[in-house]
């Protein structure tokens, strides 16, 4: 382990108890990722609905798409500000791992800045030209589509970063972002998990929007609404599979901790699986039996699952890094440097 | 040294941070803080004089504050952090540990700012009756205060890099935060922000607002703020200059890359343009010439660029004064490095000792570990491109030159003995 390129920690102490920092990173990350999911699904939803509206020449689909685009640009602002805190904390408590993994994909990591600026400006252009470009639908869709492509690409950069930080023994082998995509385990499984979580949001977009309409729904509106819930159900079923794929991408020592070796990790995983099954039931009732109550409950369960996933994600990181902590100790407050 | 590195071989690593920083300062100061103050001032005047068109102009400005700050503004702010993580990890890593809770507080202010901004813009049309309008104006004032608070906090971090003051001895957060240049730099920045906003907003209003009466009303408000901000920026700027260390003060002209005469002439002209513009705004708001708006716009952007470059440069050879050198090495480790050598302590260096057969590779590692934060091999800034600047030199000349190459009085520079291979 001595040959690993892990530096001694910064001599200045971590400015608070590690436990508090961990709690903060879990909570703030969950809020951040919820808004990221909202933003990505609202933006992709807007473009998808607009394309569907154009193909079917359906005004209602346009209307829904417009509403999605309006909310996407608001949620993206909150997603960005909420991302600051977890980034701050990960930099402070995992300096020895997060900094190397960031710098190893340094140029791609920096490209996040111009890419997000472009994506966000495109989202505003998309939103503020909705009526003005009524007769230039193709151009309008293209603008939204470009923003969506960027929004779907950025998470991959973050995933490579936070995954590669778990593998100091693999750091020296490849340089740069694109080779890292295939070099480190878990990356594509994590990406799939993220994308499906984003996809799962569509049900809420459809359902919530439809339900607000006063004076009853037309037949086709009703079927669209139920269609949304059904899509949500099947995406969630896929998510169960994706979750298992990710679990099996972990190294064996970590995986068995989730499968009985460690009580906390096993319990967390079990709860999340049970909740996902409950979510499927609620979505089934919402989609196939048209139960509004089930829809509301499914939204609540969904948020709960995202929360537990955020927690599990942190535990995975801790488990992967724990062998290194003894060898390369962090500068905690009690170990304050000698003056 | 402790981390891997990236190489922006043409642009230069320092320039990458500079570009992002300058863009962010222009937006955070000029748009988020300054323009918020101007917008709510215009809204208030429109409310008092029942001027719907002026209110419309204020709303339009709020829309652009929203668009610019939540895209380029927010992302370049995060971008400074992203770029310093990649280019100056030791420095930003230390600052995060010293100022963690300040950053957390700033984050809370930033969230408040963004939420207030969203509320401010999206309720504009809905809150038009007098009672609600009053509330709307309060939201605008709260927004201005929240944006100012983010500046008031982050300035503590920025100022501490140049003047950490008693922190060097006490390692106390409060000593670091309320450091010798905190108050003058905060005062200087806040009035500079309003000045910058006046220049930006006036330029676009002059260009796009065709109705003279609206333009006149807006410029009257700007004139009021200009009359306060210009002298205050000047006075507080002098206080700021007076508070920085002598060694840093003496490097200001050098930092700009100009001769002393050129520095005085160019800055003098820029100041005159600013004064002329401010007087014109107050005396004859209807007739501000477009060429003057353009000149003052250019002068201000140039001035901010100069300010940031100077602020960064005059810290040399330090990045956190008296604590950490620009290449991330700690001042307190100097003896240790002289004793043990740089490469032996460089986590990411593959070569740990200089020998005849690995001279070139080891040299590359030393360049990456110690020089790359400021220098390039063949980058666009010839003074910092060592390959261009030192082309054709023999070993003896290099040996004599290197200990003096940073013109800042730093006594110890890269040494050629295998054990003493470190800089600055």
Image: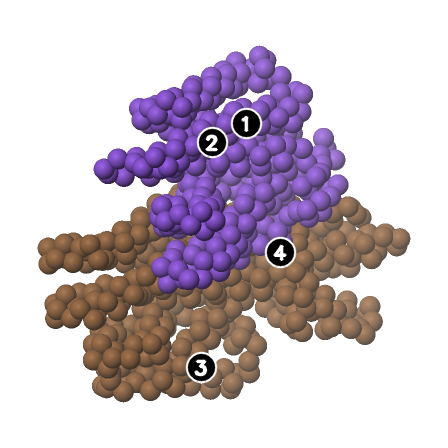
Task: Say left or right for A298 vs B408.
Answer: left
Query: Residue B11 at x, y = what percent?
Result: 63, 66
Closer mark to the observer between disc 3 and disc 2: 2
Q: Which mark is residue B305?
A: none
Mark 3–mark 2 CB contact (< 8 Å): no
Determine if marks 1 and 4 fall on one subunit: no
Closer mark to the observer between disc 2 and disc 4: 2
Kindly give the residue lying farthest to the right in the view shown.
B357
Query: Residue A326 at x, y = what percent?
Result: 62, 27
Shade representing chain B: brown
For label 1, the residue is A238
Closer mark to the observer between disc 4 and disc 3: 3
Determine if marks 3 and 1 fall on one subunit: no
Query: Marks 1 and 2, how far apart in space?
Result: 11 Å
**Mark 2: few, some, or many residues within 10 Å (few <14, many ≥20)?**
some
Identity of the residue drawn at 47% across and 31% down: A231
Query: Marks 3 and 1, how far apart in space?
Result: 64 Å
Q: Which mark is residue B267?
A: 3
For label 2, the residue is A231
Q: As rendered, which of A223 and A44 lies closer to the eye?
A: A223
Q: Which chain is in purple here?
A: A
Q: What kind of element bears circle 2?
A: helix
Q: Quadrant of the N terminus of chain A?
A: top right
């Amino acid at each position: 382990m001595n040959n690993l390129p892990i530096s001694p920690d910064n001599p200045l102490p971590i400015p608070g108890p590690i436990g508090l920092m961990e709690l903060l990173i879990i909570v703030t990350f969950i809020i951040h990722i919820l808004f990221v999911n909202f933003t990505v699904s609202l933006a992709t939803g807007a473009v998808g609905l607009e394309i569907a509206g154009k193909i079917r020449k359906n005004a209602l689909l346009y209307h829904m798409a417009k509403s999605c685009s309006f909310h996407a640009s608001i949620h993206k602002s909150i997603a960005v500000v909420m991302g600051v805190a977890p980034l701050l904390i990960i930099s402070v408590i995992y300096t020895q791992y997060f900094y190397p993994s960031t710098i190893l994909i340094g140029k791609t990591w920096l490209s996040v800045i111009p890419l997000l600026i472009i994506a966000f400006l495109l989202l505003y252009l998309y939103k503020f030209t909705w009526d003005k470009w009524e007769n230039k639908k193709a151009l309008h869709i293209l603008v939204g589509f470009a923003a969506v492509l960027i929004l779907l690409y950025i998470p991959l950069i973050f995933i490579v970063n936070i995954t590669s930080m778990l593998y100091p023994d693999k750091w020296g082998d490849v340089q740069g972002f694109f080779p890292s995509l295939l070099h480190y385990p878990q990356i594509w499984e994590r990406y799939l998990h993220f994308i499906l979580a984003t996809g799962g949001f569509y049900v809420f977009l459809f359902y919530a929007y439809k339900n607000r309409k006063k004076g009853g729904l037309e037949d086709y509106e009703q079927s669209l609404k139920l269609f949304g819930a059904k899509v949500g159900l099947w995406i969630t079923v896929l998510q169960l599979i994706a979750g298992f794929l990710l679990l099996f991408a972990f190294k064996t020592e970590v995986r068995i901790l989730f499968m009985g070796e460690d009580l906390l990790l096993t319990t967390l995983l079990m709860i999340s699986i049970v909740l996902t099954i409950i979510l499927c039931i609620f979505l089934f009732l919402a989609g196939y039996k048209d139960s509004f109550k089930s829809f509301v409950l499914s939204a609540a369960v969904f948020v709960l699952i995202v929360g537990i996933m955020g927690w599990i994600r942190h535990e995975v990181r801790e488990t992967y890094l724990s062998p290194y902590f003894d060898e390369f100790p962090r500068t905690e407050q009690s170990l304050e440097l000698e003056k | 040294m402790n981390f891997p590195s990236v190489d922006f071989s043409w642009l230069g690593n320092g320039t990458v941070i500079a570009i992002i920083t300058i863009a962010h300062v222009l937006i955070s100061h000029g748009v988020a803080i300054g323009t918020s103050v101007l917008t709510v001032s215009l809204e208030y005047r429109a409310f008092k004089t029942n001027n719907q068109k002026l209110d419309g102009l204020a709303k339009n400005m709020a829309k652009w504050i929203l668009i610019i700050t939540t895209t380029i503004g927010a992302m370049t702010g995060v971008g400074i952090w992203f770029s310093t993580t990649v280019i100056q990890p030791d420095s930003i890593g230390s600052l995060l540990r010293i100022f963690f809770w300040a950053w957390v507080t700033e984050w809370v202010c930033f969230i408040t700012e963004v939420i207030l901004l969203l509320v401010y813009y999206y309720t504009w049309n809905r809150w038009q009756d007098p009672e609600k309008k009053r509330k709307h104006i309060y939201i605008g004032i709260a927004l201005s205060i929240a944006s100012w608070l983010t500046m008031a906090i982050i300035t503590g971090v920025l100022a501490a890099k140049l003047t950490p003051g008693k922190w060097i001895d006490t390692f106390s957060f409060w000593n670091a935060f309320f450091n010798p240049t905190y108050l003058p730099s905060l005062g200087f920045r806040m009035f500079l922000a309003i000045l910058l906003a006046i220049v930006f907003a006036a330029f676009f209003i002059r260009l796009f607002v065709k109705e003279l009466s609206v333009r006149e009303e807006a410029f009257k408000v700007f004139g009021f703020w200009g009359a306060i901000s210009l002298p205050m920026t000047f006075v507080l700027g002098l206080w700021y200059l007076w508070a920085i260390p002598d060694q840093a003060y003496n490097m200001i002209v050098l930092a700009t890359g100009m001769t002393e005469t050129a520095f005085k002439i160019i800055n003098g002209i820029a100041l005159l343009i600013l004064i002329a513009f401010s007087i014109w705004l107050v005396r004859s708001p209807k007739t501000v010439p477009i060429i003057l708006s353009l000149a003052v716009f250019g002068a201000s952007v140039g001035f901010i660029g100069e300010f940031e470059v100077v602020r960064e440069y005059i810290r040399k050879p330090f990045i956190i004064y008296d604590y950490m050198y620009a290449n991330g090495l700690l001042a307190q480790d100097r003896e240790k490095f002289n004793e043990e050598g740089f490469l032996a302590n460089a986590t990411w260096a593959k070569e740990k000792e200089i020998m005849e057969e690995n001279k070139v590779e080891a040299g590359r590692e030393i360049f990456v570990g110690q020089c790359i934060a400021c220098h390039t091999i063949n980058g666009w800034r010839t003074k910092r491109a060592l390959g261009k600047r030192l082309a054709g030199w023999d070993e003896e000349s290099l040996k004599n030159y290197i200990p003096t190459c940073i013109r800042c009085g730093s006594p110890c520079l890269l040494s050629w003995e295998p054990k003493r291979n470190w800089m600055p």
